[in-house]
């Protein structure tokens, strides 16, 4: 009986010990996964931050071998750099602790300038030797699309390298004629593996994007040599408003089949002058750090026919009233554009007009009013006020007249608000007081204020 009791107690102790050890192992694995310790999963692979660091080491070794100077554009990693300069200094030590490059996500984003990419068949073999799976995404080159030829060769847009379920996303950046960098959208064809990466969570590829060329520096992050934008906070700010819209070349070609383009010497000369004025406007406002977008007839011309409307006789831009600066007028005057008129005041219906070289520049200031926004107009001889109401909109980049410039993202809503459902039909006779689809009477300026709110030069 005593021997039976001893056996029972021994068995019980072994069972309790086993449960305790399993519990300890479970807690250790949880802690390791959370803190990035070197842990093997049930298939013998590294997991957690350690696996991600090894992916990055293999990837950076690969691109270094093939002389591909990628640079970090991962939004979470760059945000961490912006927030913790002390940790950044610590990370520059040659110690493979993963503080910046290994985030809570299963992917890290890099970029490569398209002119530095040269296809090398050996790259695929070298990637495979490192255990890296590679997925290439191609798309049309918009730089080769014109209204005369809507076909274009395909170029590489995105590369994805996968190791142990984790991904490095390389975004290809190409220089456009407006001297800016562009990346294309990431579109999956039916033949591509949709489980290869968490496509819906990637920073880049949901839409095309546009950026100024960043200055790069080589640094050490988490024990790895990495190029990063020198002004990484500025790059993140650009990222937040980087969405890019292409000119609608196919629709423009259809438009000109119905309404042949005016190629008279006068029309060609006007477009050249308007282009010069638009570039000058961009330089002046960029120096002042005042954002603007194509508005009214200039926006219509971009959206409808990818060009300036020759009979419009002016260039129209919009600016949020919150971005108004009193030095806008002297800045344009210094650039050689005299003030033609100033209507309204900062608090209400401000509008500026400058005289270019036989082309007028109209600047409309937009006011926020709940669910809508509006800009004002003033009739000089009567003091009558008008307002032009638009649905709320966000801003996207585009290329127009070889210039990187902003337009309303919801362009058709914007154009339709101003020109009505028949916006696609040219109208050469236009009365700014009655023709716009969204014009409203807005009272009359008091006579005592005329000297301030109605200034014509």
Image (cartoon, rainbow, N blue to C red):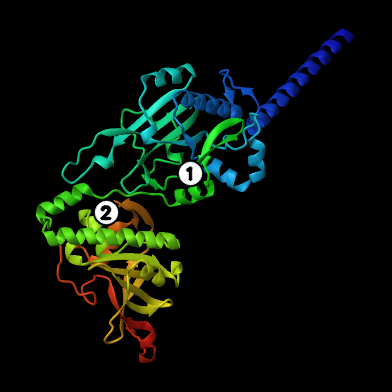
Measured as percent of width and height from the top left, residue 41 is found at 59, 22
Q: Vertically, is 205 above or below 308?
A: above
Name the residue tied to disc 1: 215
Quarter assignment of residue 27 = top right
Image point 41% across, 49% down: which residue? 242
Image point 41% across, 59% down: which residue? 286
Q: Secondary structure at mark 2?
A: loop
Image point 44% across, 23% down: which residue? 133
On-image quarter of the C terminus: bottom left
Nearer the N terminus, badge 2 or badge 1? 1
Mark drawn on residue 401 = 2
Image point 77% across, 20% down: which residue? 17
Mark drawn on residue 360 = none
Q: Is 330 on the left-hand or right-hand side of 387?
A: right
Q: Vertically, is 200 above or below 33?
A: below
Q: Is 221 on the left-hand or right-hand side of 118?
A: right
Quarter assignment of residue 339 = bottom left
Depth check: give the residue in front, 143 or 30.
143
């Amino acid at each position: 009986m005593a021997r039976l009791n001893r056996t029972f107690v021994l068995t019980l102790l072994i069972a309790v010990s086993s449960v305790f050890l399993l519990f300890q192992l479970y807690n250790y694995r949880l802690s390791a996964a959370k803190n990035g310790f070197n842990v093997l999963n049930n298939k013998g692979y590294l997991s957690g931050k350690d696996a991600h660091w090894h992916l990055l080491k293999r990837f950076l070794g690969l691109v270094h071998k093939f002389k591909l100077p990628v640079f970090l554009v991962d939004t979470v990693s760059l945000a961490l750099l912006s927030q913790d300069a002390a940790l950044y200094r610590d990370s520059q030590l040659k110690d493979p602790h993963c503080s910046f490059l290994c985030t809570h996500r299963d992917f890290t984003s890099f970029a490569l300038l398209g002119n530095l990419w040269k296809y090398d068949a050996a790259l695929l073999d070298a990637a495979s030797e490192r255990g890296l799976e590679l997925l290439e995404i191609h798309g049309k080159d918009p730089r080769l699309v014109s209204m005369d030829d809507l076909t274009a060769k395909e170029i590489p847009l995105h590369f994805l390298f996968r190791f142990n379920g984790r991904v490095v996303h390389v975004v290809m950046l190409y220089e456009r004629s407006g001297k800016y960098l562009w990346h294309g959208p990431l579109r999956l064809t039916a033949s591509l593996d949709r489980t290869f990466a968490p496509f819906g969570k990637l920073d880049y590829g949901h839409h095309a994007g546009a950026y100024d060329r960043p200055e790069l520096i080589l640094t050490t992050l988490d024990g790895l040599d990495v190029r990063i934008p020198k002004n990484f906070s500025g790059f993140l700010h650009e990222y937040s408003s980087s969405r890019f819209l292409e000119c609608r070349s196919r629709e423009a070609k259809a438009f000109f089949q119905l309404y042949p383009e005016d190629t008279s010497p006068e029309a060609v000369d006007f477009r050249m002058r308007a282009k010069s004025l638009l570039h000058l406007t961009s330089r002046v406002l960029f120096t002042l750090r005042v954002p603007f977008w194509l508005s009214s007839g200039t926006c219509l011309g971009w959206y409808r026919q990818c060009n300036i409307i020759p009979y419009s006789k002016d260039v129209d831009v919009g600016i949020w009233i919150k971005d108004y600066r009193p030095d806008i007028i002297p800045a344009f005057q210094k650039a050689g554009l005299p003030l033609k008129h100033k209507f309204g005041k900062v608090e209400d219906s401000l509008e500026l007009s400058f005289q270019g070289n036989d082309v007028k520049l109209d600047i409309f200031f937009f006011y926020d009013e709940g669910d809508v926004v509006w800009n004002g107009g003033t009739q000089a001889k009567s003091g009558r006020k008008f307002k032009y109401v638009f649905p709320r909109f966000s801003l996207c980049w585009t290329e127009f007249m070889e210039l990187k410039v902003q337009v309303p993202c919801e362009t058709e809503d914007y154009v339709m608000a101003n020109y009505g459902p028949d916006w696609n039909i040219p109208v050469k006779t236009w009365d700014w007081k009655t023709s716009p689809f969204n014009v409203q009477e807005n009272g009359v300026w008091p006579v005592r204020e005329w000297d301030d709110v109605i200034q014509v030069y």
